[in-house]
Image: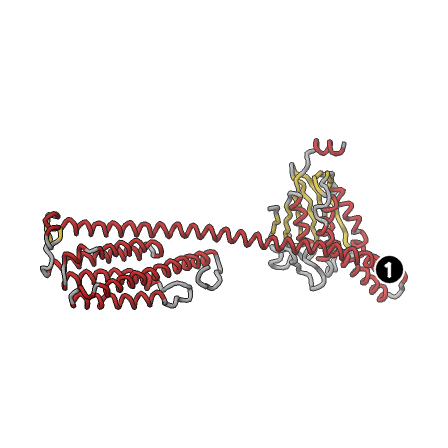
Amino acid sequence: MSSTTTSTAAAGPTLSPPRSDSDELTFLLAAERARAEGLLNVLRLVIVVVLTVAALAYSTALPRPLRAANAAVLAPMLLWSVALASLVRSRDGAYPRWLSAVAPIVDATAVTAIILCYGLLGSPSVALKAPITLVYFAILAARPIMGSARSTGLTAACITAEYLAALLILVQVAHVTLWSDPITAAASANVAILDEGMKLVLLAAAGVVATYVSAWHERVLRRALAAQIVRNTEQRDLSIRLQEADKLAALGTLAACVAHEVNSPLTAIALSAEMLGRGLTHPADREEANAIASDARRTATALHDLLAFARQGQTEPATVLLGDVVTKSIGTLRSLLRERRVVVERDAESGAVPVNGDASALERVVINLIINATQAMESQSTERIIRIRVSGDGDTAMLSVEDNGPGFSPGAVEHVFERFFTTKPAGKGTGLGLWMVADIVARHGGTISATDTGHGARFTVKLPVIGYSENAEAAA
């Protein structure tokens, strides 16, 4: 079975580095929640300190049981708030999830304890009518900032249940009498059923709203952070592409300089070695001279690839006949093909298929494909054949270069057009030839594919054809 590959033209907490978009999203959510919870803990500490100062200021006017109640509730809450504000966070930069869920329930329980203490030890009606119950709503209002919907719902249920329990306890021990008439209750030391019922309804409603807002806030935050991740990824990709472009530009400049300094000596070495080989009679000496000429030509070919890369986009496109491109390419490589005993077979019907492009660039495509096929058959003792076919099918021109060599090694066909990928031994190839071929074809608006036929390798180039009327105008 054959395999084919195709190239086409186309400041917060410290965390461990995210390995994927999902990890990065989790990281950003944890950072946002940690910042929100840190702020909430500071506010909690400030409020408790203010309440403590107020309790101390009014301590002389309070009876001893109430002073003791203040101390029993506010002292642990002060220690609790200090501990939360200075708590060392976990390795992921956030407070433990269980602690984030327990903290608001502890706060609500402290408020309930104050209400019960004042109701049992002092004036129950004052305890129920005092503004301290507003702290319940403050706790619920803070939950959507950093809590999940589940945690907020649990907190709301606990607050409603605790206030209801406190009210029932005070009624049960006969410290509070519920009156159905709010006006009469307001004038007495008792409370109205309607007032307390409305408090419970408002607490439940506030809990439902806070739960919904928590879920909505988390969804919005996730979407915003996901969009930020996409932007960050695009910026990183752009930065990488810019760095790669700078490197490739430097490579092009280096190639031009090296070509200027080295091309002439290499040509002289190759010609001298060929002339020396013709004058030698001993087979071993002649083989050494030919090896020198071959290495010089191979080095010149690699240098030519680099120079061709440096000159990309410096010529204007024109009408090109693929048949002529193949003829010129074979003529350029005639000595190499003769030396390597390679037979090139052309389709007798390879005609004048016109394409719009750079003739010299397309010649480099054919030359690279022929050289690649020749090198693939170097160790082959049987007949070495390269078959080249040019055809036009509607609006597509097709150029096929096929050899009868060993084909591709396992897994190589998927990577043959990648930059610097080569299956040749070290020093035998740069891994740029086929990559530049794919790049040239893509810039001409075409595609190139590599196929292991089972008895060799085939490269197929497809380019858009110029209409014959357009071609006639160009020729005229």
Count the numbered circles shown: 1
> Which image quadrant is residue 431 in?
bottom right
> Which image quadrant is residue 252 in?
bottom right
Which residue is found at the position 65% from the left and 37% from the top? 395
| Quadrant the C terminus occupies | top right
Graded by Cα atoms within 10 Å as few (under 14), some (14 to 19) or many (20 or more), the crowding at tag 1 reads: some
Which residue is found at the position 15% from the left and 61% from the top? 119
Residue 270: percent from the left, percent from the top?
83, 59
- Asked if one can make out residue 102 in the rendered structure from this viewpoint, the answer is no
Residue 279 located left or right of residue 333 = right
Residue 180: percent from the left, percent from the top?
10, 49
Which residue is found at the position 66% from the left and 60% from the top? 423
Q: Is residue 445 above or below residue 18?
A: above
Residue 156 located left or right of residue 367 = left
Q: Nearer the viewer, residue 38 or 258?
A: 38
Residue 324: percent from the left, percent from the top?
76, 42
Q: Secondary structure at mark 1?
A: helix
- Asked if one can make out residue 283 in the rendered structure from this viewpoint, the answer is yes
Which residue in the protein does label 1 denote?
Answer: 272
Residue 320 located left or right of residue 171 = right
Q: Nearer the viewer, residue 387 or 266?
A: 266
Q: Nearer the viewer, residue 214 or 287?
A: 214
Residue 388 located left or right of residue 89 = right
Render colour scheme: secondary structure
Residue 436: percent from the left, percent from the top?
68, 51
Q: Is residue 399 above or below residue 475?
A: below
Type of amino acid under label 1? Ser
Q: Nearer the viewer, residue 294 or 457?
A: 294
